[in-house]
Amino acid sequence: MKKFLLINKKINSFNKSIGISGDKSLSIRCAIMASQAIGTSKIFNLLNSEDVNNALIAIRKLGIKVTQKKNYCEIHGNGLNGFSFRENTKINAQNSGTFARLILGVVAKTNKKIVLKGDKSLSNRDFTRVIEPLNKFGMKINSKNNKLPLKVLGTKYLRPIDYVELKGSAQVKSCILLAALNTPGITKIKCKPSRNHTELLFKFLKLNLNIKKKNKYDLITLKGEKQYRGFNYRIPGDISSASFFIVLTLLSKNSKLILKNINVNKTRTGIIDVLKKMNAKILLRNRREYKGEQISDIHVYSSNNLKCIKCPKEFNSRLIDELPLIFLACAKAKGTSYFQNLDELRHKESDRLKLSSKFLKMIGIKNIVNKNSFMIKGNPNLSLSKNFIVKNFMKDHRIFMLSCIAAMALGGKWKIYDKDSINTSFPKFLKTIEELGGIFK
């Protein structure tokens, strides 16, 4: 089976309404929380992707019964630290940085050794940011250069910590909260605002969590060791996956798209705010709340007059995964766009800042990377007709999907490698393109 995709034709105008697969961040978090609940949880619309399926495999290895039904996933928890597994159990997070970092907090109280590993991409990523706070709890984590594989040993004698998190990392914050959940006493976190799915789940489950907003920081306290019962949860559509089709619609002619039942949690909708500042017509309709999360239908319309933006740096944590797509929109905008403080973009599945710059230059867009800032000179008349080959991008699923959107919206003849990369987060990506009338080989 060939590992590349051929796109030789732009997508035609479309007027469609589509659904999007379940939110990956919530899928992983719900599976983790269900594994520690007392009794059975039912999770509907759980994302069927490699990242989520690997999380389920790992939970099974920890002794938790997981049953896949036709319309939902059933997870039978044994309460906090209710795991049963052999010494030196190997857990493979594959490509998922979210699961790898969160599971470390979950096993904080286990006194059997665990080996955590991942694929080539994940094994190149630094885990210092979670190793440091977990060591303060009393865990022992050994590794070479603070990278995977990690040898992990929890302790029955966890101690609560006070921790300052300065990167705005939801993964670090969630890892600490999951460790604190198994720890007696009160853990305190001072952190930059970031995705808050974990906090909303904790509140939904009535755990002893308190959040105060102080200037540009959140002050979070959690009193640990409170048990909770199994729950039912329906995962809404993923805004990160929906974003590819938002940008495709904006850059396509005479098109309209409705994306149904999307999670529009305000910590995740930075891309919508930025695109609106660039003059995009995007409307949120049928808004409602579901167990703390905000759900909406997103209406998107083609745009012929996108304008440049000087992106506020405080937006970065709300759109970190969508930045390459925003860069593509800037390529078609009038004027020069500026971004700064993009260091976190270098620590994803690949160095996405470096690859985004390389990608834009390939399609004829002038740009400059200066350390962790980015300047893009847009071309509103951008239209492609050359041959393009996209490869050697660390099998980063978002770079693959970005390339497909550029090909469909801007034209040219494209050969895009590593199409299987989408299985980590959005296996239905190509099928969704077909629903809109896109053609590829």
Image (cartoon, rainbow, N blue to C red):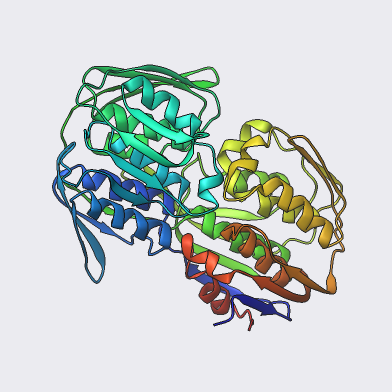
Task: For the N terminus, give its image quadrant.
Answer: bottom right
Between 281 and 413, the one nearer to me in the picture: 413
| Left or right: residue 201 compared with residue 206 | right
Residue 167, compared with residue 28, is above or below; it is: above
For the point 47% across and 46% down, which residue is it? 97
Task: For the C terminus, give its image quadrant.
Answer: bottom right
For the point 50% across and 29% down, which residue is it? 193
Q: Position of residue 238 (x, y in %)?
A: 46, 56
For the point 31% across and 44% down, which residue is it? 291
Q: Position of residue 112 (x, y in %)?
A: 22, 37
| Left or right: residue 225 compared with residue 263 | left
The answer to whether residue 268 of the structure is visible from this angle is yes
Q: Position of residue 339 (x, y in %)?
A: 74, 38
Between 311 and 4, the one nearer to me in the picture: 4
The answer to whether residue 221 of the structure is visible from this angle is no
| Left or right: residue 20 compared with residue 376 | left
For the point 66% across and 58% down, which residue is it? 393
Residue 290, compared with residue 428, is above or below; it is: above
| Left or right: residue 438 compared with residue 190 | right
Examine the image and state in which quarter residue 196 appears: top left
Q: How many numbered marks appear?
A: 0
Examine the image and state in which quarter residue 305 appears: bottom right
Q: Position of residue 106 (x, y in %)?
A: 29, 37
